[in-house]
Amino acid sequence: MENKIEFKINGDYIELLALLKAIGIAQTGGHAKMIVDEGVVVRNGDIELRRRAKCIKGDVIIVDDHKVILS
């Protein structure tokens, strides 16, 4: 079962850690770092290990059963 989320970016980009917190996948900044460090974040088909990766409109982020589409 997939949980699909559409997230609207205000500005040019959002950092990955901030995105994970904003959509509720991570409760804290430390939790967000753990999620990224575990290698379970997939961005546009590739594993994303950069905590401060700049996520832009059109990116698709997958974490476990959550699929986030940035607009």
Image: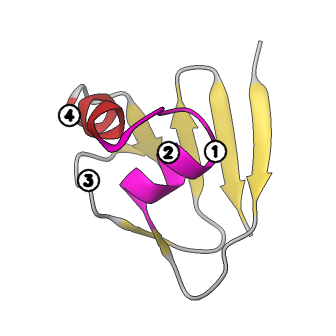
Q: Is residue 61 left or right of residue 33?
A: right
Residue 51: assigned label: 3
Q: Secondary structure at mark 2?
A: helix
What type is the residue that disc 1 sits on? Ile
**Mark 2 near mark 3, Cβ–Cβ under 8 Å?**
no
First of labels 4, 3 by sequence position: 4
At x 75% / y 68%, what residue is drawn? 8
| First along the sequence among labels 2 and 4 | 2
In the picture, the disc for residue 23 is 1
Residue 55 in picture, x, y percent from top left:
48, 67
The residue that disc 2 covers is 20
Mark 2 or 4: the one toward you: 2
Q: Quadrant of residue 1?
A: top right
Earlier in the chain: of badge 1 and badge 4, it is 1
Against 22, residue 37 (above or below) is above
Asked which secondary structure carries label 4, the reply is helix
Describe the element under mark 1 as helix, strand or loop: loop
Q: How many numbered badges does the structure rendering display?
A: 4
Bounds of the magenta span? 15-29
Disc 1 from disc 3: Cα separation:
16 Å
Give the residue displayed 24% in from the left and 25% down from the top: 38
Asked if residue 50 lies left or right of residue 48, the reply is left
Q: In this rendering, does residue 45 appear at all? A: no
Rounded to the nearest angstrom, the CA distance separating label 2 from label 3 is: 10 Å
Up-down relation of residue 53 to residue 1 (above or below): below
Crowding at mark 3 (Cα within 10 Å: few <14, some 14-19, many 20+):
some
Q: Residue at x 52, y 55 (%)?
A: 19
Q: Is residue 19 visible?
A: yes
Q: Amino acid at mark 4?
A: Asp
